[in-house]
Image: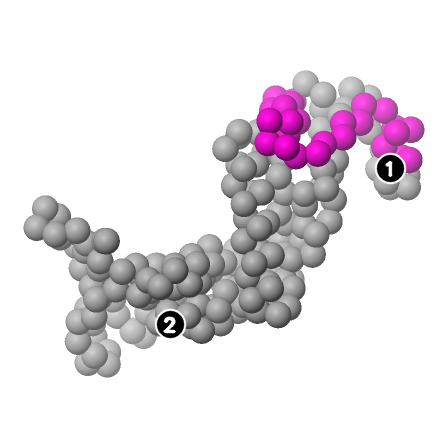
Amino acid sequence: MVSSEWKETRGEPSGDKLFDLIIVGAGIMGSATAYEAAKLGKKVLLFEQFDLLHCLGSSHGESCTIRATYPESYYPPMVLESFRLWESAQSAAGYRVLVPTPQLDLGPGNNLSLQFSIRNCGPNFVDARVFDSNPRLSEEFSGAFRLPEGWLAVSTPLGGVIKPTKAVAMFQSLALHHGAVIKDRTQVVSIEPRYPQSRGSNIHRRRW
């Protein structure tokens, strides 16, 4: 097990504490990680340099998207697993922060990113429908989109809209329920590896 300590640089004199996992940044990814680790019984500390639920990063607002169409082959399996984890977290919280929707990607037919995105769907069991003509696309989406000449479109059912601020709050609430410690308005000022003496590091932080 890798353990880490955090030490005060200034602020409340609370002394040294030992954690299995210290996470820097309480956005969606940091808060979700804190929840999953705490759920597994790990002693977790989550740092956020600003106020919780701030609007200074990418994990805030009313909407962001999730999709399974990526040119990189390692992304679709991760997205499929993330949908399972989203459903599990929402079930535990008792409310939804992700609204499933179809995903539609469009682009020039010779665009390599689009071509690889289409190619990666099959091996990862992502149901994809490719459109190369406007009549088929219009029938599928009630005439909302038109393809320029030489363009392709790919539609998959694995898409969705996430409410970021609500999602962050959900993961933090779940993490706290499982015993995680969350410190906001706390900057990490240094990380000192303890190798080779031990597995872990000293993390120095300060409150403001």
**What label does residue 140 carry, if any?**
1
**What label does residue 179 carry, if any?**
2
Amino acid type assigned to the residue bearing label 2 in the image? Gly
- Residue 137 magenta-highlighted: yes
Magenta segment, which residues? 111-139
What residue appears at the point 67 percent right and 50 percent down from the top-left corner?
160
Q: How many residues crowd mark 1 within 10 Å: few (<14), some (14–19), many (20+)?
A: few
What residue appears at the point 22 percent right and 59 percent down from the top-left corner?
4
Label 2, secondary structure: give it: loop
Q: Position of residue 206 (x, y in %)?
A: 26, 70
Task: Compare residues 5 and 123 and report the one nearer the observer.
Answer: 123
Q: Position of residue 170 (x, y in %)?
A: 54, 68
Horizontally, is 143 left or right of 89 in the view?
A: right
What residue appears at the point 81 percent right and 23 percent down from the top-left corner?
132
Q: How many residues crowd mark 2 within 10 Å: few (<14), some (14–19), many (20+)?
A: some
Total marks shown come to 2
